Amino acid sequence: MNTGKKLVVRRAGSAAAVAALAVGGIAVGAGSAWAKSSIAVGVSSHHVAVGHTVRVTASGSSDDFGATPIQLCIDERVGTGAWKQLACTNKYSLGLNVRAPHRGEIQFRSQLVAVFNAHHRVVDRTSGTDAVWAR
């Protein structure tokens, strides 16, 4: 075999090997699907006067539970007290105006909750907190 033919045969073999690796990589990547979730909470201001309101917004979505309804909720905690659920929606975003009743820190978080029936709710994701100082 002459040198030109050897070069063409080698390159064709290399191209075939690269194509096989690429197709194999795509097939491996296609099998490893991950559920996608995102959640966030934010406040319009980190300082507010007592008696005034602050805007709290949350956004989130999840495909972890397939066809099961997911609710987006906003929770509030005053100081070091317990978390209290303020509102929930079946939409991907929620906004509330919350009044600061007294001095101190008010924390907010959002949660994605799967609703299996009226009495069985499972928390899917919880956001980090965002705080407001009432003065």
Image: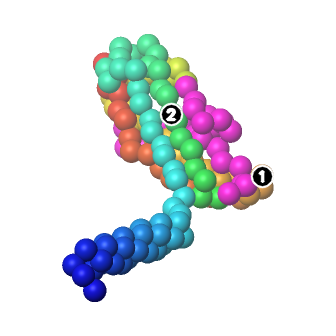
Which residue is denoted by mark 1 in the rendering? 118
- Mark 2 secondary-structure assignment: strand
| Image quadrant assignment for residue 107 | top left
Identify the residue at horizontal 52%, vertical 53% (top origin): 36
Q: Is residue 109 left or right of residue 4?
A: right
Vertical comparison of 128 with 47: above or below = below
- Mark 1 secondary-structure assignment: loop
Q: At which x and y percent is residue 22?
A: 41, 68
- Looking at the image, tell me whether mark 1 or mark 2 is earlier in sequence order: 2
Q: Nearer the viewer, mark 1 or mark 2?
A: 2
Which residue is denoted by mark 2 in the rendering? 58
Identify the residue at horizontal 65%, vertical 58% (top origin): 65
Taking depth in this image into account, of 7 and 17 the one nearest to the observer is 7
The answer to whether one can see residue 84 in this image is no
Q: Residue 71 lies in magenta, yes or no? A: yes
How would you classify the magenta stretch by its main secondary structure? strand
Q: At which x and y percent is residue 92?
A: 60, 36
